[in-house]
Amino acid sequence: MTTVWTQARRAARMNPSIIREILKVTEKPGLLSMAGGLPSADTFPVDALKAACDRVLTNNPRESLQYAASEGFGPLREWVAARVATLGMAVSPDQVLITSGSQQGLDLVGKILCDAGAPVAVETPTYLGALQAFTPFEPLFASLASDDEGPRPEAIRALPHDAPGTRFSYLLPNYQNPTGRVMSAQRRAAVVEASRQAGVPLLEDNPYGDLWFDEPPPAALSSLWPEGSLYLGSFSKVLTPGFRLGYLVAPPALYPKLLQAKQAADLHTPGFNQRVVYEVIRDGFLDRHVPTIRALYKANRDAMAAALREHLPAGCEWRSPLGGMFFWVRLPAGLDAMALLPRAVDAGIAYVPGAAFYAQQPDARTLRLSFVTLTPDLIREGVATLGRLLREALETADEHAP
Amino acid sequence: MTTVWTQARRAARMNPSIIREILKVTEKPGLLSMAGGLPSADTFPVDALKAACDRVLTNNPRESLQYAASEGFGPLREWVAARVATLGMAVSPDQVLITSGSQQGLDLVGKILCDAGAPVAVETPTYLGALQAFTPFEPLFASLASDDEGPRPEAIRALPHDAPGTRFSYLLPNYQNPTGRVMSAQRRAAVVEASRQAGVPLLEDNPYGDLWFDEPPPAALSSLWPEGSLYLGSFSKVLTPGFRLGYLVAPPALYPKLLQAKQAADLHTPGFNQRVVYEVIRDGFLDRHVPTIRALYKANRDAMAAALREHLPAGCEWRSPLGGMFFWVRLPAGLDAMALLPRAVDAGIAYVPGAAFYAQQPDARTLRLSFVTLTPDLIREGVATLGRLLREALETADEHAP
């Protein structure tokens, strides 16, 4: 077919999301899906949101329904500045940009900092949505060698610094998606020190930091190097993703360009949504609400940890996460999580093959399991099915072994 | 100051918005501002939105507060397909992408179609926000020679078609921002025919099309060349801008890439907002509501037209718009709208200097006046002040003439 449309060079790099295609497969009704990255809908504070919608439309209808400032709603920006102070970050509300989910923060940062061929460092593995957000800007991804505590400091020191220079490292220190791992205080200090020495700034993404189970995570990376860090936060995991509200905290040197990018991208995040969320959280609501999410998710984590111990065959490896939403499982040699997925779906379960989360050289033996969208009973049932499937696959693999 | 941040090449092109800086000046309390591009807050259907928020959170709390499909809410996409059919466009709901305001549609199209140095054609003058949305992707703007009916067909035929080729023409056929002009049916046919011959596709932006005063505008450009057109629509001017809801209609050949760009940009437009707006409009609400906006704006248009005739000095030129929100005034030779703005603000009024709306070679004698944010009485007062100011300026200019 001939077409009158000439697409941009960058469009050629944008390919259908693997995970998107996978999630379509996993939308089969009745499937026990451990694939999604969705928070539990049981945690949404419906009554509080309903009351807040009513109050905002009663008290401030004209302001909440009109065009608004690209920076975001002033009181919400102040709230964010106070909130990140509890993570050790001393910032002014003027450094806070309200975004349409923290995914938009990734897009804006990509637009301002990425050039074709300039390296951007990411963890191994990393959040797929960040790879998708940066890809249109044609960075050269550099996968940082990583272990159970996150990226290794020597990998950061080894990043290319000749022109065009590594533009930033994208890091998720708390209960990372997909691995669930958390960076220790010691690792944080070492990573920041290495970054400072290498002259490579940080983009810190923290959607899961509030979802700790026994003790809060260490202070934010951004608290250790304020002038070299950008910070992304989100209301999606502690309140609702359906309002698409996140925030970006930027050093004063970068803020004006990010603000221009925001204005060009969508003028501003819905003022109504910002006012409703502020109305819900202004009086300490999250301090009462988030502990209920932690308790729910911790019970689910425990259920999945027990089920994995009971049902998974020898040779599978995982660590019980200390927070967040995900287990990361490595299968025994010879098994391929992507290849097994159709059989898993036939058997009534779903997961995300880990290969989707690597910028380079995927580990085909990995998979991600969410423990927050099923009940403990269904988690046990789903993991039991996974265990059966893996044992069968191992037997088949043995039969076919030379 | 040294900085660890290396900005992208494209960031250098992004400069503080002139209009943004201007609007800051015009935020002085008590100012009679005719500068803003805001719809009248009197038109926001507060009660309908309040009831819809309540219904959505009562009937579908889990779905409306959860992550949702990047394409948008299915019933809303169907509504859009039916709506644009009234403009002559035969499209499937599968061709509809719900966006975070139509501004986001501009960003997504820029991302998919613009390359550094590849021409993009725009009207003379054109919507400033589009220039801002495309600029990060480094197009070479080609200003189409335009008259009272819009861009001239011969200017489209003359667009560069050697590689990298003109990527698209960005056109606002209905009550254009900033000029208020509308393209006749004859001009539409000629522009589409010229575009087809030149092989230059169209991006049609239609935020004001519903705001006609005496008769609806001719059929959409996109209805005349479906496979060569992208279409942007918005709920900002007929319902509320504070929900940030717009839509993009794309030919099947382009839809998948735009969808990927949307997913990378912010995952999806807030599902809650989409469901609330659908709940408001599903039963023909706009057919009852929009006529009240038309009546209000028409009365204001009449008030401003009469005031301009009464108060503006000889040599000023303008046409009374047949819809939309703006008058476009050209001052007598020797006057500069930007240079006069500080005196206007001192005198208690504000407008937007037209120079901001030109991709190239601004006409310093032009200015934009909104007639929808002030009452008729205040419009008369504001225009009387503008008239006094212009007469004084003309006298001063005469004194300084050689």
Image (tube, coloured by chain):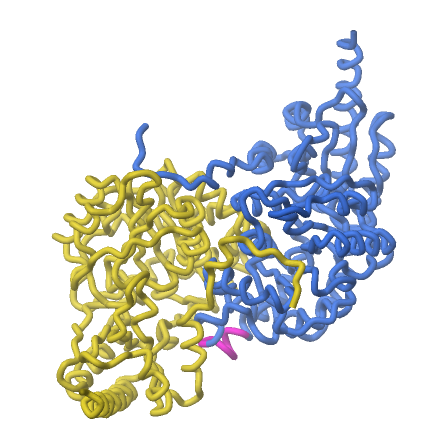
Chain colours: A blue, B yellow
Of residues B180 and A39, the one drawn nearer to the viewer in this rendering: B180
| Residue B149 on image: x %, y % | 16, 60
| Residue A375 on image: x %, y % | 74, 44
Dominant secondary structure, magenta: helix
| Residue A3 on image: x %, y % | 31, 34
Residue B343 sits above or below residue B83 on the image: below
Of residues A79 and A309, the one drawn nearer to the viewer in this rendering: A79
Residue A48 sits above or below residue A323 on the image: below
Q: Is B281 on the left-hand or right-hand side of B218?
A: right
Residue A126 sits above or below residue A212 on the image: above
- Quadrant of the rendering where the N terminus of chain B is positioned: bottom right
- Quadrant of the rendering where the C terminus of chain B is positioned: bottom left
Q: Quadrant of residue B177?
A: bottom left
Furthest-top residue in this view: A402
Residue A61: within the magenta? yes
Q: Is A337 on the left-hand or right-hand side of B181?
A: right
Q: Is residue B61 visible?
A: no
Residue drawn at point x = 79 percent, y = 36 percent: A380
Residue drawn at point x = 31 percent, y = 45 percent: B166
Residue B286: within the magenta? no
Task: Give the magenta range.
Answer: A56-62
Q: Is A170 on the left-hand or right-hand side of B340?
A: right
Q: Is residue B221 visible?
A: yes
Furthest-front residue in this view: B402
| Residue A96 on image: x %, y % | 62, 68
Q: Is B106 on the left-hand or right-hand side of A349?
A: left
Q: Quadrant of residue B233?
A: bottom left
